[in-house]
Amino acid sequence: MEANIKNLENNKDEETIAKWVSEITKQVNVNQIYLIIGDEESNCHYRFIIVIEDMAKRFKQRVKEILEESLQEYPLFYAQFFTLHYIQNATSEGNTFFLNHCTKKKLIYYHHSYYENWLFHNVDLTAFTIKAKENFLNQEEKILGFKNGANLFLEKESFGHATFMLHQTIEHSFLAAEYFLIGKTFTGHLISDHQVFMGNTHKEFENIFPRENETDTNLLNKLNKAYCNTRYTLNYQIKKEQVLIIKKRAEELIQLVKKYVEAEILKCQISFKKNPLTQTIEKVSDKNEPQTTTDEAEESFLNKIRKLGKENFMTLKPIGGIREGYYLNYARVYDYLELFALLQSTLNVCILALEEQQDFTLDIRNKEYDVKAVLGFAKNLIPLEEATFLDKVRELLNKEK
C-alpha cells in the first residue's frame, strides 16, 4: 500500500526528514506521523509524534529500541510513539496534547488512507475542555495537598518528612506537566529523571535544579534520596536552609506548570472555535437542503462502510496471484530466535495436552513459560481493528434506523 508524505514542501530539512521517516516506516508499522517544529522554548528542533497499532508490551520495547537507534544519527530530532488505544483513552480523560498536536496541518506521513476525525471520532468536543480543566484541577489539588503537608512538617521542624512531601509536590508537578505537554508521564521517582524527561522538549523545566554548580547538585541528590530514605531509614539528614530552597523551587515549578497547562487548554478552546469541522457531533440536516433519493442515500451509506473497512480491516492482507486466502499481519516476533522459541513452546503445549505421553514431557522443564508464550502470542492475534469496524457499523445502522 502506498505511503504518503506531505506538508514538508517549505521545510529546509525536507530531504532529511523524509529519509528518517522512510527508515522508521520500514521497521515499524506506522499509521501516522505528526511533526512539531520547536521554538525558542524547546530543546529539540523537530519533534515527532508517531501513531502505531495497538501491540503487546514486548513489541513496544522493540519499537522504543528502533527509535532510539535511529535518532542517534539525527541530533535535531526527538520522537515518541503512541498506540491508537492510548491516544483515544488519554483524550477521553481530558488530555489536551493529542488534540493540539495531531492535526491535519502537522501531519507529515500517513499509511493507506487519511481520515481527519480518525483519532478523535468518539470525543465530545463540547464537553472536552470542561473535562480537561477538571483533570488538571484534580492534579493541582493533589500537588497543593503535598505542599501543605510539607509546610506542616516544617513548622514542627521535621525536615526529613518535609523534604519527602516536597519531593511528592515536585514529582506530581512534573507528572502533570508531562501528561499535558508530552502526552505521557515518565515512570520513576527520581526528580532528576523527570527534569531530563521534560527538559528534552521544554527548556524551562530542565533547570529547576541546575547541574552547573555543586550546591544545586547536592540539593537534587538530597531530593532524589528523600523518596526512599525518609521512609525506610533513620539516618536521612537535611538542613532547614536546604529544605527552604527546595520549597521555593517547588513553588516556582507549580506556577510554571500552571502557566503551560492553562495555555494548552486555551489552545484547544481556540482551535475548536477556529475549526468547527473537527466537531464529532453529527450536523443536523437543514430542511432547505435538497433531499437525497433512496438510491443516493444507500450508495452514501455503502461508501461510509467501504471507507470504514479500508481503515480498520488491517489484520488480514489478501494474497496476490493465483493463490487464494490472506496473509496474517502484525504477528510480530523480535527475531528468529524468539520465533523458534515460540514454535517450540507451541509444540510443548501440544505434547503436554496429550494423555499418557509422559515420556515425551520429561525434557519440558519450563511448562509455565511455554503456556504463557503461546497464550501471549494468541492474544496478539485478536483483530482489535475489526472490532472497531463493527462498532462503527453498528452506529451507522442505528442512525439509519
Image (spheres, helix red, strand yellow):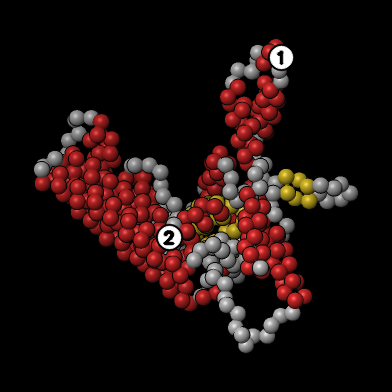
Residue under the image location 87 percent in, 50 percent down: 321
Q: Residues within 10 Å of mark 1 (few under 14, many from 20)?
A: few
Q: 381 or 50, which is in the foreground?
A: 381
Left or right relative to 25: residue 216: left
190 above or below 343?
below
300 above or below 218?
below
Q: CA distance from mark 1 to mark 2?
A: 57 Å
- Element type at mark 2: loop
Q: 292 or 96, which is in the foreground?
A: 292
Q: Nearer the viewer, mark 1 or mark 2?
A: 1
Q: Is residue 384 visible?
A: yes
Q: Is residue 239 visible?
A: no
Residue under the image location 19 percent in, 47 percent down: 150
Q: Residues within 10 Å of mark 2 (few under 14, many from 20)?
A: many
Q: 112 or 28, which is in the foreground?
A: 112
Residue under the image location 71 percent in, 80 percent down: 292
Q: Residue furthest top?
A: 359
Label disc, if present, on residue 316 of the rendered structure: none
Residue under the image location 55 percent in, 44 percent down: 60
Quadrant including the N terminus: bottom right
Q: Position of residue 132 (x, y in %)?
A: 40, 62
Label disc, if present, on residue 356 of the rendered structure: 1
Left or right relative to 148: residue 288: right
**Residue carrying label 2:** 94
Q: Position of residue 78 (x, y in %)?
A: 49, 54
Q: Position of residue 91 (x, y in %)?
A: 47, 59
